[in-house]
Image (cartoon, helix red, strand yellow):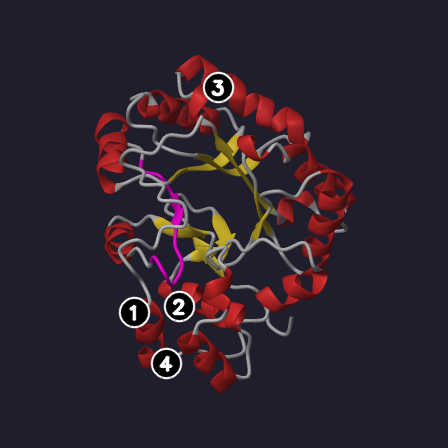
Amino acid sequence: MSKPIPEITLNDGVTLPVIGLGTYTLRGSEGVHAIVSAIEMGYRLLDSAYNYENEGTVGEAVRRSSVPREQLRIASKLPGRYHAYDKAVKAIQESLYRANLDYYDLYLIHWPNPKQDLYLEAWQALIDAKKWGLVRSIGVSNFLPEHIERLVKETGVKPSVNQIELHPFFNQAEQRKWHAANNIVTESWSPLARANDILQNDTLQKIANRHNKSVPQVILRWHYQLGAISIPKSSSPARQLENLSIFDFSLDETEMSMISGLTRPDGRIRNQDPAVYEEF
C-alpha cells in the first residue's frame, strides 16, 4: 500500500479509517492468521459482531499483531435476542470477555427488529456502556431514518454510524443523503455485493480497465468517494492488499454516476428489508 488510509471523524470525535476488514466467517486459527495478516498489511478497523461468533478470534489476532491496541479500531454488534436493557448490558460485557478486550471502539445495534420494539432499550444500554467506558462510540446497523429519529427523540443521543447494505446494485442514495444531513457516517456492509455477477459486470470492467485496476478496487474507490466506510472481507493476503490499494487513483463524476446507475429496486442480496426483517 503506497498511501496511508484516510480517516473520518465521527460526530462524537472518534476517528475511523475509511476502509476496514469485515471478519464475518473468519474463525479459529485460520481466522486469526487472516486477521493478523490484514493488520500487518495496514488495516486498522476490524468489524465483528456477537452473532459472528468470532469476537475471540478478533481479540486473539489483536494480541498477536505487532500493532498497539490503541492504534486499532475494533467494532462489534448487539444481537436482536438481547435488546432488552438488562440483557443488552450483559451482552456488551460478554462481547468484551469473549475478545478479552477492555473496550470496543465502536458498538452497534445489529438490526432494529421493529416487531419486537425493544431497540430503544438496546440503545439506552449502549449509551450507558459508553458512559461506563466499555465502548468509545455507539451506532446502529440496518436502521431506517424513522428508527434513528425515534432514538434521538427519546434519548437525545445520535448514532455516530449506521452500517447498511450498500454496493453498486443497491446504492442507498436516499438513506445516504439522510445520513449526511444528520451528521451520521454511512458504513457499507457487503460492499462488493457478495455476488460473482458484479465482478463480471461490463460497466465496472470497462472502468477498471481504464484505470488499470481490478473491479473490486473500482467498487471500493466508489464507496470511498461516496463518503462511506467500506469493510470488505478477505482471508487472502494478496486480496487484502489489493483492497487497500485504492488511494492512488480517482473516479470522475461520469464514472461515479455510471456505477451508481447500476442500482436496482431488487438489489438487496437477501431481501433483508429493515422495516420487516428481524435477526436474533
Question: Hey, which quadrant is residue 262 in on the image?
Answer: bottom left
Verify CB contact (< 8 Å) between mark 4 and mark 3.
no
**The C terminus - image quarter:** top left
Magenta part of the chain? 158-170
Mark 2 sits on what residue? Answer: 225
Residue at x 47% of width, y 15% of height:
87
Mark 1 sits on what residue? Answer: 261
Q: Gap in Å between the C-alphas at discs 1 and 2?
A: 15 Å
Residue placed farthest to the top in the image? Answer: 86
Mark 3 sits on what residue? Answer: 89
Q: Which secondary structure, mark 2?
A: helix
Residue at x 46% of width, y 65% of height:
198
Mark 4 is surrounded, within 10 Å at the Cα level, by few (under 14), some (14 to 19) or many (20 or more) other residues, namely few
Q: Is residue 134 magenta?
A: no
**Foreground: 6 or 188?**
188
User: What amino acid type is highlighted by mark number 1?
Assistant: Gly
Considering only order in the chain, which callout, 4 or 2, is on the residue closer to the N terminus? 2
Q: Gap in Å between the C-alphas at discs 2 and 3?
A: 36 Å
Q: Tag on residue 177?
A: none
Verify CB contact (< 8 Å) between mark 2 and mark 3.
no
Mark 1 is surrounded, within 10 Å at the Cα level, by few (under 14), some (14 to 19) or many (20 or more) other residues, namely some
Q: With 150 as the anchor, is 165 left or right in this view?
A: right
Foreground label between 3 and 1: 1
Residue at x 62% of width, y 48% of height:
72
User: What amino acid type is highlighted by mark number 4?
Assistant: Asp
Q: Which secondary structure, mark 1?
A: loop
